[in-house]
Image (spheres, rainbow, N blue to C red):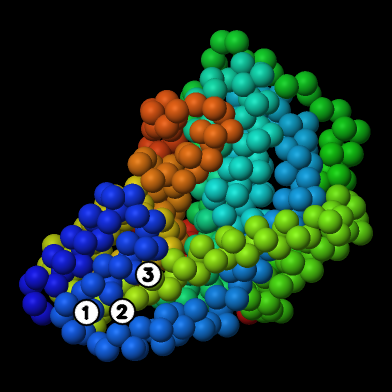
Amino acid sequence: MDPRLPVLLFGSFGILLFLSFPIAAALGISSVLVISVFDLAPLELLPQQLLSATDSWTLLAVPFFILAGNLLAKTAISERLVRLARVVVGQFPAGLAMVAVIVSIFFAGISGSGPADTAALGAILIPGMVAAGYDRRSAAALMAAGGGIGIVIPPSIALVIYGVVANASISKLFIAGILPGILVGLSLFAVSYLLFGKAPGIRPEKRGSLREIGAAFKDAAWGLLAPLIILGGIYGGIFTATEAATVAVVYGVIVGFFIHRDLKLSDLPEILVDTGVTTGVVMLLVCTASLFAWVLNTSGVAAAAASGLLRLASGKVVGLLLINAVLLVAGSLMDAISIFYVLLPILLPVVKALGIDLVHFGIVMTVNLAIGQITPPVGVNLFVACGIARISMKEISRAVLPMVAAQTAALLVISFWPELSLFLTRFMR
């Protein structure tokens, strides 16, 4: 391998990011530049490489899950879930903060996207928490951290991408993400109680009566059923992850048009356009990131980097600590899809050599990237929460530090207790 190749590849990529190029463009330009300079392949083959990156039955799950999330978000399911959580736990210390975490866990089973969860729930809960006496910055930070659970608990677009790149079972990844996602939520419970449990000026919620709880549960039942149907079908071997995505779309149409009747035919063009735009962004990232990964593999950079990482890792414990450190830094600088394609060619040989289960590692990597969504300077959930709370990035970056610490503690448990991720997968058909 020419030692100048990785310098040009990563150097040009870093410079383009510094110049505020979109990540997809930076990945593509740096890849084409290296291919041209070092004559790795004829440029005529690039369109074929880009096409092969997206020509995947499994990747069809991505637009369908995005569409299902957009459909269900339009049916006011988030408001119904918030109402249910408020009458059940709102009266406890830091009750509204706990409501935010609980609803984030449930909504994660619907959308599969961290920014989408932050936007849908933050618009309701951030103003509500501020009105109840919560600090605006901490409320926004908590909602951004809760949104990160959306890529851990299935259905998760991030887990679909990981399954495609690592050639791992997406059905097993979905089931494996349940308990770790709940653990991440519990870590936010703990930090919420420490921050808000005895804070002066916070007004407790009114205790809900049995009748109110029953009415709220009935109103939110269709929202609660959505993840159960998706995961139950996968868990029972009734359908694959891609088929589950289409089932989720059909479910969203039925609930939106015929049960809650919140959807109108006039809403469909906006929903379909939003879905198309989001899918286009995801697939453009998949194309250029897969080209970057192809350059890493073809040039031998990935093999050399994996060999160097293996020499540093004296065992599974040290190896996992090193990998987590790399992923936490990468997550603060790049989006999840790019990281999967860029780093997995380097990390997979190391993971296999250390004897780490691919499904377990998928959950570890995804939790790392969930933390990356609330880590400056590229924490996408932070930008969403900032816009809703009308605060600066500097303010929310300070307020989110306790949430980052709590989720990092949960990450260490998930990393070194693989059975937490793999336990439920043993009962799958």
Q: Secondary structure at mark 3?
A: helix
x and y percent of residue 317 in the render?
25, 58
Q: Which residue is denoted by mark 2 in the rendering?
A: 294
Residue at 54% of width from left, 15% of height from top? 199
Residue 225 makes an appearance in the image? no
- Residue 22, placed above or below residue 49: above
Q: Choose top left, top right, bottom left or bottom right for residue 211.
A: top right
Task: Give the mark toward the camera: 2 or 1.
Answer: 1
Q: Quick one: quadrant of the C terminus?
A: bottom right
x and y percent of residue 203 in the render?
67, 15
Any mark on residue 36, and which? 1
Residue at the far top: name it. Answer: 200
Could you tell whether 117 is left or right of 337 in the image?
A: right
x and y percent of residue 22 in the render?
39, 56
> Upstream in the sequence, badge 2 or badge 1?
1
Q: Secondary structure at mark 1?
A: helix
x and y percent of residue 417 in the render?
40, 57
Which residue type does callout 1 highlight?
Ser
Task: Give the mark toward the camera: 1 or 3.
Answer: 1
For the residues labelled 3 and 2, the Cα–Cα distance comes to: 9 Å
Q: Which residue is denoted by mark 3 in the rendering?
A: 289
